[in-house]
Image: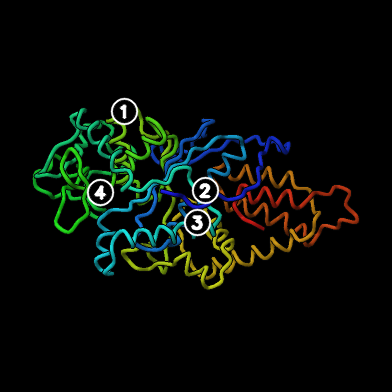
Amino acid sequence: MQTWTALSLPDYKLASHGVQITSKPQIWDTETQIKTEITEKDIKLYVCGITPYDATHMGHAATYLTFDLLQRLLLIQGRKVSYVQNITDVDDPLLERAIRDKIDWRELATKEIDLFKDDMSALRVMPPQHYIGAVEAIPLVVKSIEKLMSRNAVYKIENDLYFDISSDPDFGSRSHLPLEQMIEIFSQRGGDPTLPGKRNKLDCLLWRAHREGEPSWDSPFGAGRPGWHIECTAIALEYLGSAVTIQGGGSDLIFPHHEMCAAQGEVMNDVSFAKYFVHTGMIGYQGEKMSKSKGNLVFVSKLREAGIDSMAIRLALLANHYRSDREWDDLLLQNATDRLERWRKGFAKPEGPEISETISRVVDALNNDLDTSKALSHIDAWVESAISDFDSDKNSKLANTGTLARFIDAVLGIAI
């Protein structure tokens, strides 16, 4: 599937600008429960994409901005990032919404994918190198299921195929949840723990045999369609090799989705599926998690239609730490709008206060588990100096404000 148009970004590398950074990029790893230094020079990043049955809300945007920020941070420090994202363009929620709205499921998926791409472009999110739909990945899914079969990790209930979690001795090690809680969450997020014939309540669906009125594709197992978890495992391993560096997504994917993906990948290849598991907090609205099932959504496209600057939306989502569960409200957006206006005022002159220390402080903050709140505060301080205290006629140490603006664009994705 074609991704959205690549951005024209400043080619900003810290080394080429003589900026000295003593800190190393660290990120919180869900599996080990500690901040861990990212040591790899070549990063294989896989982030779970949308199920396209509704528009992009703030929860989606916050997740993709987080991994956009991480990618930018690594790139300016000279790392290479190979980025893959999927789209679950056939799944129960999509089919159910299409029936409700009396629209063909393919038409609904196409419409929402196009809107998602527009939103990501407006928010200056860098596109993945590979943007893969579940439908186009069906041959990869079939190949992955066959490999799991060769490891005796698959069994049949009627004509459906299930993954046997007991084939992965490390199952549960990424999510750290007690069994009863796993079962409860599994039932809430597409699982079927009470289905008769299952070896384990948590065994997940790999291949759903054809049902009347549902789309299906031919396979060696009979007509059907992929389960949710095997889709991501198959895509990640096809495009990034036997293991990925970072598996990313919202914290609601820790279990069952990322646990299942990792278990399947490790059984297939006898190596850890991912080195780091990175998860973003949930965005709330009016006291509850923002979700399609609750209907309490604030959409990126609606804010844009209302004339809100997309850079203000981005700043609002970067204002708090990516791992924190947080609220979206009008005050957050207003504060971001005011901050953006202040920044643009500070960058209005071609010369301003010295910038190297500000750049170093911003990078140090981001190296510390993407501490955007502190990073933005360092830019605020420079801006206040530029507006209030700096007198270019009396100051011999001038800096080109455009250089700092290019840095902010490169690392934070904010076009001043």
Relative placement, left or right, of 83 versus 91 is right
Q: Looking at the image, which is closer to me, 192 or 37?
A: 192
State which tag comes first along the sequence, 2 or 3. 2
Which amino acid lies under the numbered mark 3 shown in the image of this protein? Answer: Met
What residue is shown at x 36% (from left), y 33% (from top)? 273
Sequence-earlier tag: 3 or 4: 3
Three-letter amino acid code at the position of disc 2: Asp
Q: Nearer the viewer, residue 91 or 256?
A: 91
Callout 4: helix, strand or loop? helix
Looking at the rendered structure, the secondary structure element under dot 3 is helix
**Marks 3, 4: nearer the viewer:** 3
Return the disc, 3 or 1, that comes first in the chain's sequence.
Answer: 3
Determine whether label 1 and label 2 are within 8 Å by CB: no
The residue under label 4 is 181
Q: Amino acid at mark 1?
A: Asn
Q: Which mark is residue 68?
A: 2
User: In the rendered structure, are the residues bearing label 3 and label 1 in contact, judged by CB atoms less than 8 Å apart?
Assistant: no
- In the rendered image, the quadrant that contains the C terminus is bottom right
Q: CA distance from mark 4 to mark 2?
A: 32 Å
> In 3D space, how far apart are the residues under numbered discs 3 and 4 (Cα atoms)?
34 Å
Residue most extreme to the top = 270
Residue at image coords 37%, 30%: 242
Residue denoted by label 3:
120
**Place of residue 83 in the rendered image (x, y in percent of width and height, measured from the top left):** 47, 41
Residue 44 coordinates in the image, percent (x, y) = 46, 36
Quadrant of res 295: bottom left
